[in-house]
Image (cartoon, coloured by chain):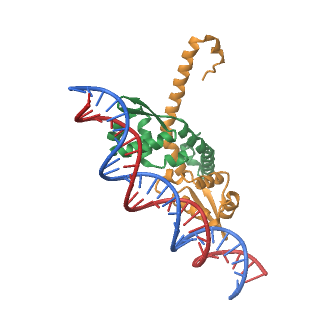
Chain colours: A green, B orange, C blue, D red
DNA sequence: TCTTAATATACTCAACAGAGCATATGCGTG
DNA sequence: CACGCATATGCTCTGTTGAGTATATTAAGA
């Protein structure tokens, strides 16, 4: 379960992370909002905690879980290398469209600039 | 194996994607550059192809594989919701630091503005 | 057409992850 | 201090996945 990528491969864990992005939540809140059995929630929270995605504080019998940014930022950093590729792709597409424009000048004005 | 997230959970697949970001490659090139057995490469390429991460064209006996942007963009879109959280986090940290500044004014000038 | 290079696929095996259920732990309250 | 709520953990079972090895497919070239 090493990598951050493996952690977010699990749909229910992604749901938990998405829920925590707005504010911290107790286990019971997560359980009710996501309609998951309590042991399932606790087990996924354990995985998330050990991987550094969340941290918890004790509030009487409750544990309040909240997001930590680092692991998701790591994923984001890996994705960065592909963003340049996407823009290059868009550029190539636009150059292609521009070439089409030259053959059909009537449509040129419908094209937006970057 | 449905989701894009599950696909990139595999380290070797991430390596292949990273390799393809610079240019398209044949199976043999991937095999040599990443030091993977050929069946391993082919199997991962199949998974990547069926999930829409790559596409291939035939060049004599070779197959040239290249990236397709959509699935990674989907991952990127999911991550977007957390970026606001990160900046909020940084803001909170900075407010905290600013409060510290008020108690130790001497250090204030070392703080950079946003 | 025989051969060789490039790639894909089939099959088996071992490891692991998630679900479900039962149960343990810990804290507050009467 | 006994009970109840909130949460964590243990255990078993099952499905899936990746590795490894062998083999099939397809095209090029002598």
Q: Is residue A3 above or below residue D18?
A: above
Camera-side residue of B19 and C11: C11
Residue depicted at 64% across the width and 65% down the height: B38
Q: Is residue B22 above or below residue A22?
A: below
Q: Is residue B79 visible?
A: yes
Camera-side residue of B81 and C30: C30
Residue depicted at 61% across the width and 21% down the height: B113
Q: x, y (%) of residue A96?
A: 62, 51
For residue B18, side relative to residue A20 (left or right): right
Q: Is residue B74 visible?
A: no
The tally of labels here is 0
Camera-side residue of B100 and D4: D4
Q: Is residue A61 above or below residue A15?
A: above
For residue A62, side relative to residue B103 (left or right): left
Q: Is residue D17 above or below residue A60?
A: below
Residue depicted at 42% across the width and 41% down the height: A16
Q: x, y (%) of residue A67?
A: 47, 35
Residue depicted at 58% across the width and 41% down the height: A74
Q: Quadrant of residue B26?
A: bottom right
Q: Quadrant of the C terminus of chain A?
A: top right
Q: x, y (%) of residue C28?
A: 30, 26
For residue A21, side relative to residue B55 (left or right): left
Q: Quadrant of residue A65?
A: top left
């Amino acid at each position: 379960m090493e990598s951050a990528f493996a952690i977010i491969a699990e749909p229910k864990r992604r749901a938990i992370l998405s829920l925590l992005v707005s504010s911290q939540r107790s286990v019971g809140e997560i359980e009710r909002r996501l309609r998951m059995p309590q042991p399932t929630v606790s087990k996924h929270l354990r995985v998330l905690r050990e991987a550094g995605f969340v941290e918890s504080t004790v509030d009487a019998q409750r544990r309040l879980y909240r997001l930590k940014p680092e692991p998701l930022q790591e994923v984001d950093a890996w994705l960065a290398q592909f963003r340049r590729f996407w823009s290059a792709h868009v550029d190539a597409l636009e150059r292609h469209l521009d070439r089409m424009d030259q053959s059909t000048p009537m449509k040129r004005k419908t094209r937006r600039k970057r």
